[in-house]
């Protein structure tokens, strides 16, 4: 959780120093969605495994 918070913090700080264009916002949303889906799937898998123990 701490690592995720740090990555989010760095991303927000980076947006403050760059010129925000429409394609940057779309690319950011796509990357966020891809990682969100991956970690959601991985989390569900590990929850089932731990409950099975």
Image (tube, rainbow, N blue to C red):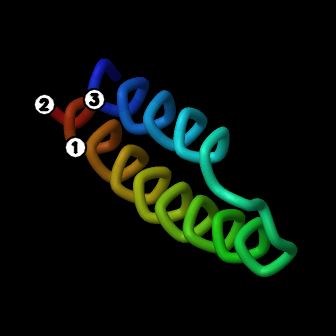
Residue 29 spot, x, y in % from top left:
71, 64
Residue 41 as seen in the image, left or right of residue 26 = left
The picture quadrant where one finds residue 51 is top left
Q: Is residue 42 above or below residue 5?
A: below
Q: Return the residue nearer the eye: 45 or 42.
A: 42
Q: How many marks?
A: 3
Helix, strand or loop under label 1: helix
Question: What residue is at 49 percent from the left and 51 percent from the top?
Answer: 40
Q: From the viewer's perspective, is residue 31 above or below residue 32? A: below
Which comes sooner in the sequence, label 3 or label 2? 3
- Is the Cβ of the residue at disc 1 closer than 8 Å to that at disc 2? yes
- Alpha carbons under labels 3 and 2: distance apart: 27 Å
Few, some or many C-alpha atoms within 10 Å of disc 1 (few <14, some 14-19, many ≥20)? few
On residue 3, the disc is 3
Side (left or right) of 11 relative to 39: right
First in sequence: mark 3 or mark 1? 3
Residue 10: percent from the left, percent from the top?
44, 36
Q: Residues within 10 Å of mark 2 (few under 14, many from 20)?
A: few
* Residue plotted at (49% across, 35% down): 8
Q: Which image quadrant for residue 23?
A: bottom right
* Callout 2: SS: loop
User: CA gap, disc 1 to disc 2?
Assistant: 7 Å
Residue 49 placement (x, y as % from top left): 22, 43
**What residue is drawn where x is 21% and y is 32%?**
50
Question: Which residue was labeled with disc 1?
Answer: 49
- Estimate how packed mark 3 is, as few (under 14), some (14 to 19) or many (20 or more) residues with alpha carbons within 10 Å: few
Q: Quadrant of residue 32?
A: bottom right
| Viewer-nearest residue: 15 or 33 | 15
Where 7 falls versus 27 (above or below)?
above
- For discs 3 and 2, the disc positioned in front in the rendered view: 3
Which residue lies under the disc numbered 2?
A: 53
């Amino acid at each position: 959780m701490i690592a995720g918070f740090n990555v989010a913090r760095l991303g927000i700080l980076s947006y403050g120093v760059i010129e925000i264009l429409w394609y940057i916002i779309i690319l950011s949303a796509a990357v966020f969605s891809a990682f969100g889906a991956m970690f959601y799937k991985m989390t569900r898998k590990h929850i089932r495994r731990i409950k099975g123990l």
